[in-house]
Image: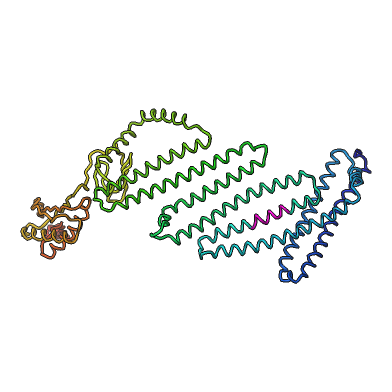
Amino acid sequence: MVQFEGVESLTRMFVLVSGELVGIIVGGLLLGLMTRLILGRIGLIPAMRDHPERLAGLRRRIRYVLISACLGLCLGALGLNGYLVFQRTDPYVQTTEWINAIPPDFWLKLALSLAKVIGLVIAGRMVINMLVRLLNSLMGKAKAFEGIRANDESIEVFFSSLTAILSNCIKFLVVIAAAALLSLPGPVAAYLLAALYIYLFFTIGLLVVKAVAAIVDSLDALSKKYSSPDNWLRHYEKLSILIPLFRRCLEYVIYVTVATLVILQLSFIERFAVIGPRLTKVIGIFFISRVIIEIGNILIDRFQQEQKNLTEKERKQRLTLIPLMKSAMKYVVYFTAILLALNAMNFNPAPLLAGAGIIGIVIGLGAQPLINDLVSGLFILFESLYLVGDYIETGQGRGVVESIDIRTTRLRDPGGQQHILRNGQIGDIINFSKRYTFAEVEVGVAYDTDLDLAYTVLAEVGRKIREVNQDVLEDMKVLGLQNFGESELLLRTITRVKPGCHQQVARDLRKLIKEAFDGQGIEIPYARRVLIFKTETEENPLKDNTSSTLSDRMR
């Protein structure tokens, strides 16, 4: 190895580097000229005359590859010579030794290999163009299938991704074949092949995700198109809420599988690949648990719908118990799913259950209000103190019962506000929905009113509303004179109605009573105000007299 030293060595190195750079540039220009001539000949073929834009695009890509290769070789030459200088080795002498060691037929083989590589690149480009046309044709047929338009976007995304992936794979294969033709060292081809595998894993995984999206959208559209009350697809609308979750779980499974395959290609982290199948099991357990919950909800609702001949009380009991059944089923399924997921991850759930039991005892001792709410909720349900749909009044609120949970009760008051009451704090309860209730209406009449006529009109109103309103159970009862007011006689009436209907019936009665009293000339007194306006003279009647007296005295 000759040491790099002196002005002579520096001059030779400068000449060598300049010659290498000029040779690389001239070689690139020659290859570009040869490529242009070859593509020009190809353009004369009759089949290619109708596609000049494709040849122009191919020419631009080859020019881009040649320019990139020339730049890379120039940088490589500069880097190699710089490394030799750093090692205090004369680049000229070292390069001369390497050239002398090259076999005589090396350059011929290199030229032939480069020609093969250029031909390979051209062939790869033509294959990619043919592939693009084929995939575009398939995409058009897929979009036209069954005349469905809801999945067009997902189909376009899938085929565009498929086109890009296959094109890149062909380019990878061209690079690997070029490395073999140029007789590059064995590790280069091995690394390129490993990179191709990793790329394929990632891209195929993403492609499968997009394919799943396209397939799921297509099946969703087909199911909605062909569903009817007469076939099993009538349940699809209720299960369709699982479609987004199904897609997401499939995506996660694909991502985990791809990550596992990539990890297997990397020896230094290969031991972590066992986590992938476990995570896949956990995702599957979670999705299956959701499917079981939705199917259970459908079965419970179907059981409720099949019970036709139910009394009003039985119907309210079902409406009360069905949410509790769904909630209990959901908790049981999720608890079982957690245990199965822990087992899938090779965790023994027995110590966790034992610890949870001890923690539950400790929490129970310190959560007396919670236990009180739970126990009170159970008694409310078992004794049917009130049910969903009942109109009740408690110390904390009044309104229609919307739901009864184990711990809370939700009321909707007439103003639209929702009251959430703890079961343990609900004291006295007034239930307006047990068997019947009374619509109470009080109306005032003038003191000079014929009370017998007023009673007759009220009774007629009671008979009329019973005929037109099914919520009225009996004719109105006129209880008589309730009170002597300052300007009115207060008459009281009650009407037996169905549970929870008393307020609306009372409103309807007031309207009918007003119309009937107006028709019979019965006055309903109302407050009157009398305004008295005083003139200036009335406010001070002595003012004018006083002024006259003073005038007389001054005279």
Magenta extent:
163-173
Q: Kindly identify the residue that appears in the image at 83 percent across and 44 percent down.
A: 80
Q: Main secondary structure of the magenta part?
A: helix
Q: Kindly identify the residue that appears in the image at 57 percent across and 54 percent down.
A: 210
Residue 222 visible? The answer is: yes
Rendered-image quadrant of the C terminus: bottom left
Residue extending furthest toward the right: 8
Q: Kindly identify the residue that appears in the image at 48 percent across and 52 percent down.
A: 243
User: Where residue 134 appears, x then y in whole percent?
Assistant: 64, 63
Rendered-image quadrant of the N terminus: top right
Q: Is residue 470 magenta?
A: no
133 or 468: which is nearer to us? 133
Q: Kindly identify the residue that appears in the image at 41 percent across and 48 percent down.
A: 295
Reply above or below: 464 against 89.
Answer: below
Please indicate whether residue 234 sits to the left or right of residue 171 in the image.
left
Reply above or below: 53 against 4.
Answer: below
User: Where residue 341 appears, x then y in whole percent?
Assistant: 49, 38
State which quadrant residue 419 falls in: top left
Count of numbered marks? 0
Please indicate whether residue 146 sits to the left or right of residue 417 in the image.
right
Reply above or below: 141 against 208.
Answer: below
User: Where residue 349 appears, x then y in whole percent?
Assistant: 47, 32
